[in-house]
Amino acid sequence: MTDTHPQIARRGPAQVMRLSRLGSLHQCRLSFMRQLTRRMARENWRFTRPVFDIDTNGVGHAVYTAHGPERAYSLVAFAHDLPPEQRSDRVIAEAWDATFTLFDGIPTTEDIERLSQNVPLQEAGRVSENELSLSRANRSVRLWAYVVDALAAGKQPDPEQIYKVGYLMRTTAVYGSGKFGAADRETTADRPELSAPFQTEMLSVYLTRTFVRDLVQHMAQAKGGDETASLDPAIAQWLGIGNSTGLGMAPFIINHPVLFNNWIMVREEAIARVRSVPHATPDRMAQFRAIFERSRLSVSWWRSDHPVQIDKLAALRTDLDMLTAELTQRDLTEHHPWDALICWSEDHLSEEGQELLASLILEPYGDLVDGLVDCMADSNAGAQMIDGSMSVAQVRALIRQSFDWALDLDWQEQANCARAWYVSEEKLEPRLGERFEEPIAEYEQPLAPARDAAAAYRALEDWADTDKIAAFLLHHPEHRHTIRRAQIGRVAPYGEIRDNTISANVLPIDMLRAKLSFFGATQFDPRSDRWVRICMYSGAPYPDELNTENADLWVYPEALQ
C-alpha cells in the first residue's frame, strides 16, 4: 500500500482520551526508546568507554561516549558506596547508589572534576549548558546482591530471578530541559538525533544500562577474583533499567496539551493507516502472528501486587486467550483485515487488550508509520497565544468541543471536586490531597481543566455572542488559562483528557502510564494509585551488539532460555 492517507478515520478524542484507556496504553514502534535505537543502528553510531575508574568498593566514575554522525554525547557516571539506610526512591533523597549526567561532547579531565563536585549532589549542585541531563539511580538491593554473589561464585544467575525483577538499578529521576543549569531544550531541538521528544533522556538511560551491567560485573570480579563468571549476554539482555515515577509526572500531560496531542494523534494516525490497508500480504500476516506470540510471552512475565493492575492483568491474559482463538479461525486475507480485527476487539476485549492489539498491528508496517515520528515534537509556539479577536460564540463552541461532557456535572458536589493538586513545601513534589479534609485549597495548582472550563462557560453566559473574547478576559482574567486551552483545541484535538482530574475516584497512575507508554516502558507495576515502577530497555541490545537487525523488535522476547 502506497497511499498514506487513511480511508478509515482516526478514533476520536471522546473515545481515546478517557483516563481508563490512557491508563491502558502499551509501547509501540513509535515509542521514544525504539526511535532512538533504530536511529543509532541506521546511522551506525559508535560507542566507547574511555574511562572506568571504579575501586573494589564500587566507588569512582566512568565515561561512556556515543559517537553519532555529527556529534558525540557522553554519559558521565559516578558510583557511590551508599549505606542501606540512606537509600530512598523519594525525589527528596540526598544520596544515591549512582549519579549521572549526559555531557554534550567528550568531557575533559577538568570537566569531570567539575562534575564530580556537583552531579553527586543532584538538586543541591549545579551543572552547566554543556550538560544535557541529570539523573540518579538506586540498586534493586536483593537482585544486585544475588547477581554479584552468583557471578563471584562462578555461576550464572537464574534467569527466572532476572525476569521477575527486570533490572539491577532503577532511576528515581532523569532531569533535562534546563533543570539545575543544564542546557535548555531549545539548545538541541534542531539536532536531528535529539529533535524527537525525550531523546536526550532516552540516550542517557540507554548508556546508564551499559554502565550498570559493567558495574555489577566489576563488583563480582572484586569479590570472586579468578573464579568469577562473566555474565551471560543472553541473561544480561533482559536486564533493563527500572524507574520509579510518582505524581510529579502526572501534571506533565495536562500542562503540555499540544505535545501530548501530537503523541496521541500520531499513534491514532498510525493505527488508522494500518486499519485502512485493504489486504494483508502473507509476509505481513506472518510478522504479526510472530510478534503476537512474543508479546504473549512478555505479558506472562508481567507481575504486580497492586489490586487495580492485578485485575487488569487477569483481564489482559483472558483477552490474549480470546485473541489467540480468534486468530486461529480468522482469515487475515479478508478485506481490511486489521480494521475488522480492531472492530472485533472493541466488542470482545478489555481496554487493556484493545490497546495492546492496536500497538501490535503497527509492527509489520514500519514503512507506513515510522515516518510519523517526525511529527511528535511540539514546535508550535504560536499555539499558546490567545486570539483576543475571537467572538464569545466561537469560544463557547470550542469549550463544548473539548469539554461538553463536563458542562453538566454538578461541580458543587464533593465527589466531583474531592481532590486538589498542590506542591508540598516539605517534599518539593506535586501532591494530590483531599480538598475537604486538608487546608490545601488556597495552594491548588491549575490542574483541573474540566472544572475550570465549566466555570468559564458559565461566566460566558452573561456575554453576547458577538462580543470579543478580549473584552471578556479584561473583566475575567481568571479564565485566561481556560480560554487559551479552548483555542489550543483547534490544533490539538487530543490535547485534553476527557475525565475529571480532581474527582474522588481519579487514578493518577493512568496519567503516568500514558506518558510512560510513549517512552516505551514495559512491566507497569503500580505501587499505589499515585506511583508506579516500570522497566526500560529490557531486551534491548547493548551498544557493542546494536545493529539494524536487532535495533527495533528487541522489546518482544523470543523465548525463555
Image (cartoon, rainbow, N blue to C red):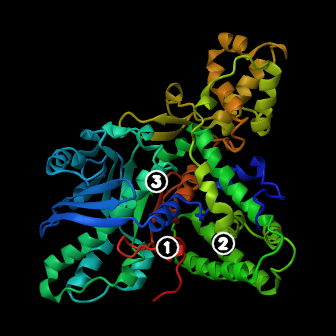
x%, y% of residue 431? 48, 40
Residue drawn 85% across the image and 17% down it:
465
- The residue type indicated by label 3 comes to Glu
Q: In the rendered view, would you say 357 is above or below 190?
A: below
Q: Which residue is mark 1?
A: 548
Mark 3 or 1, nearer chain start:
3
- Gap between marks 3 and 1 measured at Cα: 16 Å
x%, y% of residue 266? 66, 53
Secondary structure category for the residue under label 2: helix
- Mark 2: few, some, or many residues within 10 Å (few <14, many ≥20)? many
Q: Between residues 547 and 246, which one lies in front from this camera angle?
A: 547
Q: Which residue is mark 3?
A: 193
Mark 2 or 1, nearer chain start:
2
Secondary structure category for the residue under label 3: helix
Q: Between residues 373 and 454, which one lies in front from this camera angle?
A: 373
- The residue type indicated by label 1 comes to Thr
- Gap between marks 2 and 1 measured at Cα: 31 Å
Q: Left or right: 400 with respect to 101?
A: right
Q: Between residues 439 and 22, which one lies in front from this camera angle?
A: 22
